[in-house]
Amino acid sequence: MTAKVRDLPPWLAAVLPGLRGARLETPAAAELPPALRAAIVTTPANPVPTGITPQVFAGAAGPTFRRTLPDVMASIAMSGGLLQVPQINQGANSAGPHLEGQPKPEAALTFAGYTAKAATVATHVTITDELLDDVTGLDAWLSAYLGYLVKLAEESEILLGTGVPPSMRGFFNSGLPAYGGAETEPAALVADMMAQAVRTSGIYPDTVVVSTAIWAGLAASSAAALDAAAGTFAGAEVIACGALSATQAMVGPAQSLAVLGREGGTIVEGTRSHASDFVSNKAAIRAASRLALGVLMPKAFVIKA
């Protein structure tokens, strides 16, 4: 629209020039048209469009995670990233009858040891301050979930770690006896591996670690030894591990004759100290742990690699 201010209605002439910074050429008063002055303006009680109701998220509930191998194993403190492991090596059974007054047979047990080097397992996530503010309990949920992700990485290292830095040495690379049978059906395989461990060492396994494929076969079977609800097979804890390949499994007394060395626990911490994260309103949350594996009696375990 182009017009001299004096040609505009008085109420419009008074408003528009002030908005665009122009000076009035003649004095003018802001006058509303009679129809506008007589109009009734009603403010709705709820100025939200029909059909849209604002919702406030109540907060993230605490997650439930699956049981992992670190959950069932004993842990001891270590320092300097090294775990001193005493090891019992069992030979043929030398116990037997003897003549009265004569020396008794000596048990064929040898004691040795080795030093296990720790590995550091860690992860992190970045998230905006606004999202942390908007979702009640999200920071606690993320802290728990990051801790779980670290535990999964620990489990993978405990089982499959190569011992080549930065990896630790895991069960499958610790010289444990290999399964010598030919069973492939999941329930028969696990039962036969447990039987081999008992024949070799005389010690009953307390832990069974299987791939998710073997666990699916166990869960689908009608094996009397399986208690799927409790997660046990013939009384031993069953851990279904996604890090194992389809045919991999391990049985043994992981809770009594193996140990995890730790430098502290799993550390979960957050910060806004990084300059770019501060400028972008982002927070970083990280989780990390440092651990090593000690196997006290290798012959009590059986692996299927």
Image: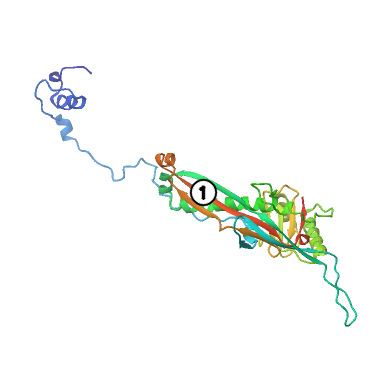
Foreground pick, 260 / 61: 260
Q: Is residue 276 above or below residue 141?
A: above
Q: Is residue 231 visible?
A: no
Residue 5 drawn at (x, y percent): 15, 20
Residue 295 drawn at (x, y percent): 71, 59
Foreground pick, 282 / 236: 282
Q: Is residue 195 left or right of residue 272?
A: right
The picture quadrant where one finds residue 65 is bottom right
Q: Residue at x 89, y 78 (%)?
A: 98
Q: How is the image coloured?
A: rainbow
Q: Residue at x 28, y 43 (%)?
A: 44
Q: Residues within 10 Å of mark 1 (few under 14, many from 20)?
A: some
Q: Residue furthest left?
A: 27
Foreground pick, 3 / 182: 182
Q: Quadrant of the N terminus?
A: top left
Q: Is residue 170 left or right of residue 36?
A: right
Residue 51 drawn at (x, y percent): 39, 42
Tell me the amino acid under the disc marked 1. Answer: Arg
Foreground pick, 120 / 39: 120
As helix, strand or loop, the secondary structure at mark 1 comes to: strand
Residue 22 drawn at (x, y percent): 17, 22
Q: Is residue 104 above or below residue 207?
A: below
Q: How many dots with numbers? A: 1
Q: Which residue lies under the disc numbered 1?
A: 286
Q: Is residue 98 visible?
A: yes
Q: Residue furthest right?
A: 99
Q: Is residue 240 left or right of residue 193?
A: left
Q: Is residue 154 left or right of residue 7?
A: right
